[in-house]
Image (cartoon, rainbow, N blue to C red):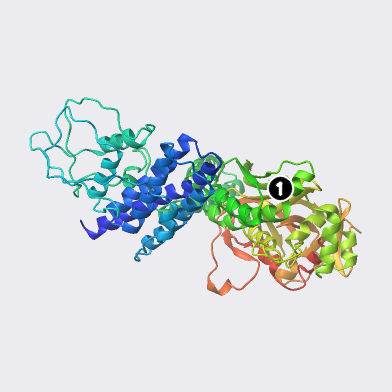
Amino acid sequence: MSAEFDLELRQDFLVEAGELLERLSEQLVALETAPRDSELLNAVFRAFHTVKGGAGFLALEPMVLLCHHAEDLLNEARNGKVALDANHMDALLQSLDLLNEMMAAVSADTALKMPPPALLKSLLPRVVAPVVAAAPVAAPVADSAPINDDEFEALLDSMYGNAVPGTVEPAPVAIAPAASKTIDDDEFEALLDSLHGKHISNVAAPAAAPESPAVSAPTDAAPAPAARQAVAAENSVRVDTARLDLLVNHAGELVLVRNRLLSLAARLGDDTLAAAASELDRVTDDLQGAAMGMRMQPVGRLFQRFPRIVRDLARQLGKDIELVLEGEGTDLDRSLVEALADPLIHLLRNALDHGVEMPDDREQMGKPRKGRICLSASQRGERIVISVSDDGKGMDPEVLRRKAVEKGVIDSAQAARLSENECFELIFRPGFSTAATVSDISGRGVGMDVVKTRVAELGGTLRVQSRLGKGSELELTVPLTLAVLRVLMVRVETRLLALPLGNVAEVFELTEGQDRELDGRLVADHRGRALPLADLSLWVGVEPGAARHVVVLHIGHQRIGCMVHEVLGREDVIVKPLGPLFVDVSGIAGATVTGDGRLALVMDLAGLVAGTGELFAALQLEG
């Protein structure tokens, strides 16, 4: 077997087994609440079994051994001999963690360590009756009885060259020249299904067969392991992400050409050019939509890691909490799947620790002892909305005011001006925490400010709602995709700036006397409240004062009005990096080419807020 082929097999195993282990985390948590669910038991058993088969084919003995012991426990549960309890589930989840570590080692091409004996012992491997080795026998004839589970498992181990310690290797099987043949993929899967599928009995039902093929050891042409046999159907294909990104990038370049031609056709007034540009516009939209669709993944890929996290934290805190997942089929850009993982973990930890009460406290308040946290996703236009809600104690605005003043986050004068919603948003301030003591989970005043920063970097917004005694909801919205950015183009003097449209709330023009100074900061009286103003002329480096158009932006949980000279309109753009010379310049995400061929800077609004200086000092007014 060539090194290239061996590497390809390993990569296929990493992909297929990785997907199985991702689903396994959620399945094991579900199995803990329904340990007698036969479908779940079968699904979990088959996952360990498939990973074991692929690991055996690649001679990953520690992984084979661990999966084998997990199989034993699960098979006893399937046969009704063992009732899975919390200790069993702990052992299975620890096995999953160790398998993930082994997968990382395989990916890094480093040696695997054998699983700890204590973990193998906790999996309670079944006691297998010793098998007495016999002389080689001829292939079974037509009226032989099917092999049972134990014999089949031993045969699998011998086929993959990984005899599991503690078992006796099966006797060699002779191959009858006349009637023997190597089983193909379908027959191998059918044999697996007959023994380990819906059928729970220890011994397959006897049935006569016209011809019983002998089973031979695999060769280079033999069926690949079960992990390799789970490759997608013929109507799908795996594409390297680098190629996919290249396709999306070219589609984005075509969008820029489309914008240029549309602008040129409008300026020249040429009907023929306008018709061609209109047709190009339609085709470009279709191509861009198809390319973007290839980048989409269901948010369930992100959500499936959280039941395990909630389960472990709830046990650590001594709470009984149910996690409900909704909208798992909602699609979002694959680049957002990993980017949203950490913010959502922080939001879930906040709900677990600060939101849901202890079971005894809930009972005294007339609530069910089991708390409820809901993680949901939905699509609104071109935005993805993800919310984390709980039925806990909610937030008290007065307590938040007092804590913020005590910790020096704001002064008493600022606290007195805060509305109820602005009090809720104090939880996103660095250094703010309502925890009385510092624990491994919370109390250090870090976490929620990280959420605010990360969501803002993604062009998203945050919203908090809470009812005292009823619970809280934290809702974050992010763009559907980061590949093509929809922006609002504005002008400051001669400089064109592109503001991400997802952050734009509204646009208005300042009237005489609408702006004034408050505590030394420029604000506008807008919709009955003080809106902090920031003149982008200062950032561009020109004399301020002439800009009277205001673009109201939501940045993280904050709201600010950016003053510009002119609002030009909306455009779809592709953001291009500006190179290493601009790495340390806050507020610039990149550049793009406008429809009329000019260069525009794409603004990094989170970077602007995080930057220092006079421009965004007005944000200190925000609660």
Q: Find residue 405 and report its horizontal and vertical position in percent.
A: 84, 67
Query: Circle 1 sits in a helix, a strand or a loop, which is it?
Result: helix
What amino acid is at disc 1? Pro
Left or right position of 84 against 218: right
Picture quadrant where residue 7 is located: bottom left
Q: Residue at x 34, y 65 (%)?
A: 111
Left or right position of 519 against 330: right
How many marks the image carries: the answer is 1
Q: Find residue 126 and report its horizontal and vertical position in percent.
A: 37, 46
Decide which of 258, 623 is in the foreground and name it.
Answer: 623
- Name the image quarter holding the C terminus: bottom right
Decide which of 423, 85 is in the foreground and name it.
Answer: 85
Residue positioned most to the left: 178
Q: Find residue 115 and report its horizontal and vertical position in percent.
A: 39, 60
Instruction: Look at the image and tell me whether residue 277 can be seen.
Output: no
- Name the image quarter holding the N terminus: bottom left
Instruction: Look at the image and tell me whether residue 59 can be seen.
Output: yes
The image shows residue 26, relative to residue 610, as above or below, that is: above
Picture quadrant where residue 409 is located: bottom right
Q: Residues within 10 Å of mark 1 (few under 14, many from 20)?
A: some
Decide which of 159, 378 is in the foreground and name it.
Answer: 159
In the rendered image, which residue does mark 1 sit on? 359
Q: Find residue 135 and report its horizontal and vertical position in percent.
A: 12, 45
